[in-house]
Image (spheres, grey):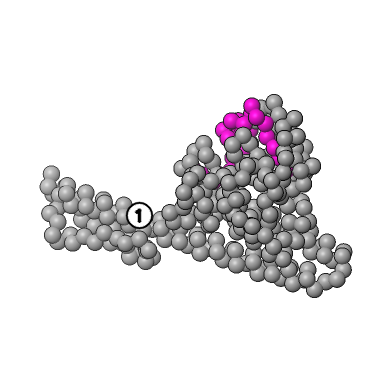
Amino acid sequence: MRIQETKMAILLLLFLLLTRQSSAQSVVPQIQLDYQDVPIGKKAINYMLMDFKVTKLDQESDRQDAKTRKFFKKLEKIEAKRMELSEKYKRTKSVKEKRRIKENSRKYIIKSMIKDIIPFWYGTPWYMGPDDDAEYPHQLGKRISCSNFITAVLQNVGFVFDSRKKWADARALYIQTSLADKEQVQRYYGITSRHFAKELMKLTPGLYLVGLNCHIGFILIKNNKAVFIHSNYVNPEVGVTAEAVEISQAIINSEGTGYWITPLLNDDRLIENWLMKKPLILKKMDLRYLYL
């Protein structure tokens, strides 16, 4: 029996040595073990398994560090493009050209959010309370609430806020009507999530905001599908996720109250704010008529 344990310990030791040689230097400190001082047997095997878990954690940390660096490279590219478009916008005197630049900017912002920003956020845990205001995906010591997810994505793409905290603490409808005209708010009431998903197919493809009974998120309508992208309070550990509208529990939970939909960034004034780096202002208006 002791010979078998010794063989297992040697094999594990060789595996760990090879694993450490191939891994990059990590920001997480590793447990240092002096194998000469540890007796061969079950105790030694347990120590090695513990060290293997730490090594695995190191490798996961390295991968996350690489993703974070890649994410900030994306943000640098987006900011460079914003500055380029901003310079063109400020230089031109032509109303037609300004309109063209704003339309190109709108398309660029939406595309960047969908392809270059939101995917990095997947898996960031949901939380509501202290430290729920992560500024970038998987920020150490931070998690993300549903409204802070909205503000973080907009902030990542280059928008600035009069007060991010004020936006994050606001009701979903205040956020929506600060990013779209109140006439653009559509309420769907008294229908199931599956019926709601079918109704969304009647809208123009694009990115929308949806306000629920106690929640807010993005809805992407594309390729005859409606996908709900949000920081998921129903499954906090999963956090930021993308799921079909018809099966989302957060959507289902709002069936009794209804769903409020607004297009995202259709207002040219918001695009001009992005180009000129002007803060977005949270508007609080009487929204009682939206419940009628």
Residue in front for this viewpoint, 97 or 34: 97
Residue shown at the point (74%, 48%) measured from the top left? 180
Residue in front for this viewpoint, 288 or 114: 288
Residue 118, visible in the rendered structure: no
Residue 98, visible in the rendered structure: yes
Residue shown at the point (48%, 45%) measured from the top left? 129
Which quadrant, please, contains the N terminus?
A: top left
Number of residues whose C-alpha sits closer than 10 Å to that of mark 1, classed few (under 14), some (14–19) or many (20 or more)? some
Residue shown at the point (87%, 68%) measured from the top left? 94
Mark 1, residue position: 56
**Residue 210 x/y as whole percent:** 66, 41
In the rendered image, the vertical position of residue 115 relative to residue 275, given as above or below: above
| Type of the residue with mark 1 | Lys
**Residue 78 x/y as whole percent:** 64, 64
What is the span of residues highlighted in magenta in the rendered image? 238-262
**Residue 235 x/y as whole percent:** 49, 38
**Residue 40 x/y as whole percent:** 14, 53
